[in-house]
């Protein structure tokens, strides 16, 4: 009985350790994902600004007829 309880205790501690490790990893991954989304938003904004500038430049090119 003592051996079985010790084995169960070890398994519970192992489960808790794995849970904590995965919880920490998930927090890290969530932060990385949020950072990636923020970076993507900044890049999209830069693309829109560039497109607007290019459209303005194209409209101001004189016709050479």
Image: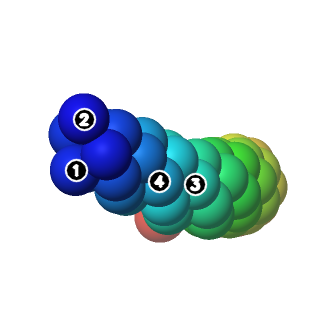
Residue at image mark 2 = 1
Question: Residue under circle 1?
Answer: 3
Residue at position x 22%, y 50% in the image: 3
Crowd class of label 1 (few under 14; some 14 to 19; many from 20; radius 10 Å): few
x and y percent of residue 7 in the render?
Answer: 25, 49
**Does the residue at mark 2 contact the one at mark 3 (Cβ under 8 Å)?**
no
Which image quadrant: the C terminus?
Answer: bottom left
Nearest to viewer (mark 1 / mark 4): 1
Rendered residue at 66%/53% (across/down):
27
Regarding mark 1 in the picture, which secondary structure is present there?
Answer: helix
Question: What separation in Å lies between label 2 and label 3 (alpha carbons)?
Answer: 29 Å
The answer to whether residue 1 is visible is: yes
Q: Check disc 3 and report the residue beneath it.
A: 20
* Residue 49 located left or right of residue 47: right
- Whichever of callouts 3 and 4 sits on the residue coming sooner in the sequence is 4
The N terminus: image quadrant:
top left
Q: CA distance from mark 1 to mark 3?
A: 26 Å
Q: Which residue is mark 4?
A: 13
The answer to whether 9 appears left or right of 63 in the picture is left
């Amino acid at each position: 009985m003592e051996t079985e309880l010790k084995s169960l205790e070890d398994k519970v501690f192992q489960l808790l350790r794995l849970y904590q490790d995965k919880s920490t990893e998930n927090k890290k991954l969530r932060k990385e994902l949020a950072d990636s989304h923020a970076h993507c938003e900044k890049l999209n904004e830069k693309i829109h600004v560039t497109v607007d500038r290019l459209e303005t430049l194209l409209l101001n090119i004189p016709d050479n007829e």
